[in-house]
Image: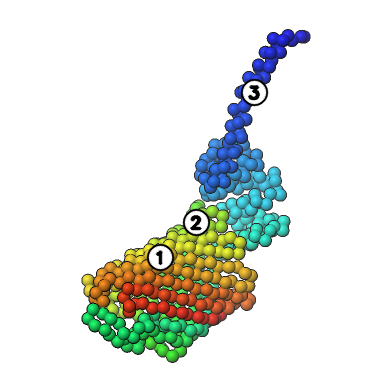
Amino acid sequence: MTVGKGGKCGFGVLLLACAGLMAPAWAQQVDTLATLRDLVSQGQYQRAFELGQAAEERYEGRAEFDFHYGLAALETGRYPEAIFALERVVFARPDQLRVRLELARAHFLAGNFAAADREFDRVLATNPPASVRANVNRFKERIAMAQSSQRRQLRGWLDLRVGHDTNINSATSDSVISTPIGDFELVRTGQEQSDKFVRAEIGGQWREPLTKFSSADVRLSYEHKENIDDSDFDLGIGRFDAGYTRNLDHGRVRVGTRLQQVMLSNSRFQNGYGLVASYDRALAPGWIGSLTAAATALRYKGDSLRDTNQFLGSAAVVRSRGAVTQSLSLYGAHEPSDASARGKHNGRDFFGAFYGAQFDAGEWGPYLRAGVQRAKYEDTHPVFARTRKDTTLTATAGTTLRIWEGLQLHAEVGYTDVDSNLPIFDYNRWLVEFGVRQTF
């Protein structure tokens, strides 16, 4: 059979026409995979998951698609979908370290701790870089904690410390205070006093799993600070905390109650009764977010004008990367007076920020903490004829040293500076202490 020039031309036209029909499908495939990859790299996980879900039937089994779809599912809390997609990649490419790490994390977040532990062990068997090994070991510690959390837990601790406090009564260093009605000389107990001290704390915690996803817990502790030379400001604090925790698909909720009693010079000084609720969830790899709300009634023995009710809210984020864990929290509170108009000046609003960093240096655990708080009181102070405003700065540096399992040495230095527009409330303070803590 011979084909003439016209036939050849017709055949060429047919090929071009077929190519034209196939091009959109090919372009669509490239565009879908590229878009999915770009959305994941930009952190738009919800949109990436929706795109991957719509295209899963067409592209599942392709490593690039399964990996990015699995990541999108993981970051939006669809753990079963993430596990199925990432397992397909691991089956085809078992040498891909990143994929196996993400699969282990998906199993962990899904609550399948045994599977997560196996995957992390397989990663460690490849002798990964030090930073990867450190991250994996932190996850394995969390797995051990999570597995133990599904069992009844009883633990206790004893903390003993000695130190020096430059301002045991949180008082001004001034000896004379000026007021609108004249100058007054402060008595000795109204001025800054320094002293050495011994501090002891004993406590215990009981946690009882109720179901696979819930538990109840009780915590009880008592702390006493005994000053060596001046017993007028010996301080004792007893605390009781009980709560119910529920694990959800995307986080954890805890509701509970808190009771606290403060003793000053072995006499009851203040009682606190409160309710607290918190919500924690993983935000991204190495990031955890937390929201807390609390309502507390503060009552003073023999001084009802100081009684207040505190309503506090806070938001915090924690980041763990390498050997460093950092945290940042923001908080604010409304604390109105519970007394008559004569005590309204004791009510206040305050807000602040707190930063902390913990370093994992093997047996050593150095840490830093810093905070700032601004408070404005509700009414004019009856003595100074002005509304009180305080700015408080705090900074702490310290370290722990692990001696053996359950036993740690502590060393810490802290500084507090309160800048008040009412001189009697203006003070600063240094505190240095050393001690030992035994958990059992």
Decide if residue 416 is in sight here: yes
Secondary structure category for the residue under label 1: strand
Q: In the rendered image, which quarter contains the N terminus?
A: top right
- In the figure, 106 relative to 23: above or below? below
Q: Classify mark 2: helix, strand or loop.
A: strand
Instruction: Mark yes or no: residue 266 visible.
Output: no
Mark 2, other Cα within 10 Å: few <14 / some 14–19 / many ≥20: some
Q: Can you give x and y, in whole percent of width and height, for residue 408 in the image?
A: 58, 77
Tell me the CA gap for discs 3 and 2: 50 Å
Q: What amino acid type should be assigned to the residue bearing mark 1?
A: Gly
Q: CA distance from mark 2 to mark 1?
A: 23 Å
Residue highlighted by disc 2:
281
Which residue: 57% across, 46% down? 41
Q: Vertically, is 110 above or below 427? A: above
Identify the residue position indicated by label 1 in the image. Answer: 352
Q: How many marks?
A: 3
Q: Residue 19: which disc?
A: 3
